Image (cartoon, helix red, strand yellow):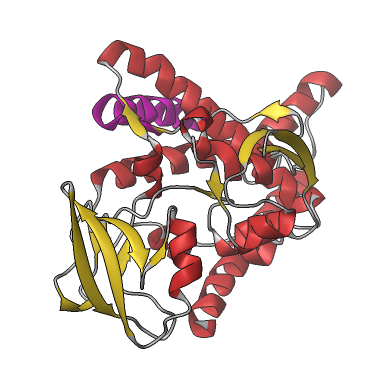
Amino acid sequence: MIGAVTVNLILGFLLFGMILWIWGEKRLPMEKMQHGVMVNSISEKVGLKNGDQLISIDGDSVKDYYSLSRDIILEEAKTIQVKRDGQTLNLNIPAGTIRSLIKTKIPFVLPRVYPVVDTVYKVARFTENALRKNDHILAINNVPVTYFDEYIKEKVKYKNQEVTLKVLRSGDTVQVKALTDSVGAIGFNPDPEKLAGSYNQDYSFFPAIPAGVKKGWETLIMNVKNFKLLFTSPEVKASESLGSFISIGGMFAAEWDWERFWTMTALLSIVLAFMNILPIPALDGGHVLFTIYEMISKRRPSEKFMEYAQMTGMVLLLGLMAYALGLDIFRIFRG
């Protein structure tokens, strides 16, 4: 009865192992973020400021940047501890923070980094010279900027006009002039994670297998906690969290990406294992439940009861599928 569940788990573990072997895993230890964090509208409401050093969540140390937002959501964090100007502060996470993270799907914070150009978009309009990859912006209209958040704060003052950038390029100082849009943007972005010191942890074949099992197990625990939050957390709304195959399709990039494809396959395999073992009639977990009842009571449930139980289970499952599909269709029309 649990054969399919077992195979799904084993497949998920093996796929995660192969993914780690071929592509590795991105890491960004919090101690590498020497300049602290850059806040956004969500983390600013918590009381964080640009440059804060994150220490712990609810007293548990934060080790890796990539697990930060996930831990806040899954653990329903209440407090966050930061170091600011040499002092350790305890900040309360207000109600609504978790829901905002789920709804917007943006990171809780970004690494605070220098304004170093990584990508220049085609919409950028330059009137003298042009920004290039690895250019380090030192000033905008003669106003010095040290960090990217300072550049963002300054650029909004110059909407729909020409600005002059002082740029450090290969050891030389260069002047670049550009036209801004309605929000003061020019059309470039840094790579905060790369600038903060993120790296790819590589695995050889044999170490990748236990690492894949560990990652698969963590994924299973994560899904169990997610499922629990749907019923216990006032901030997690089914209407914002559930989705059908349309949502799954939206998780893929515009261009084909084998790493993302296999990661999604491994994730779905783990999710199927968990969902299938739930004690719902018509699922494997329902059959297991009735079998355990029979083993304990020494008698089988009546055929009529089993028939109604299977019908009820199918109605629940089909209803959930229709609800999830309806949510996706509503999101499409809502835009």
Q: Residue 135: percent from the left, percent from the top?
A: 23, 55
Q: Nearer the viewer, residue 54 or 233?
A: 54
Residue placed farthest to the top in the image?
A: 206
Residue 8 seen in the figure:
yes
Number of dots carrying numbers: 0
Residue placed farthest to the front in the image?
A: 142
Residue 315 seen in the figure:
no
Residue 14 magenta: yes
Q: Quadrant of residue 235?
A: bottom right
* Residue at 63% from the left image edge and 65% from the top image edge: 240
Q: Quadrant of residue 45?
A: bottom right
* Residue at 73% from the left image edge and 48% from the top image edge: 229
* Residue at 62% from the left image edge and 64% from the top image edge: 41
Quadrant (top left, top right, bottom left, bottom right) of the N terminus: top right
Q: Residue 20: percent from the left, percent from the top?
A: 33, 27
Above or below, 225 relative to 317: above
Above or below, 64 relative to 95: above
Q: Nearer the viewer, residue 73 or 132?
A: 132
Above or below, 214 relative to 280: above
Residue 39 magenta: no
Above or below, 322 relative to 199: below
Q: Nearer the viewer, residue 81 or 314?
A: 81
Q: Which residues, given as a range, are shown in magenta?
A: 1-26
Q: Nearer the viewer, residue 38 or 257?
A: 38
Name the main secondary structure of what is drawn in magenta. Answer: helix
* Residue at 32% from the left image edge and 41% from the top image edge: 262
In the image: residue 30, left or right of residue 248: right
Q: Residue 80: percent from the left, percent from the top?
A: 73, 40
Q: Residue 297: percent from the left, percent from the top?
A: 85, 23
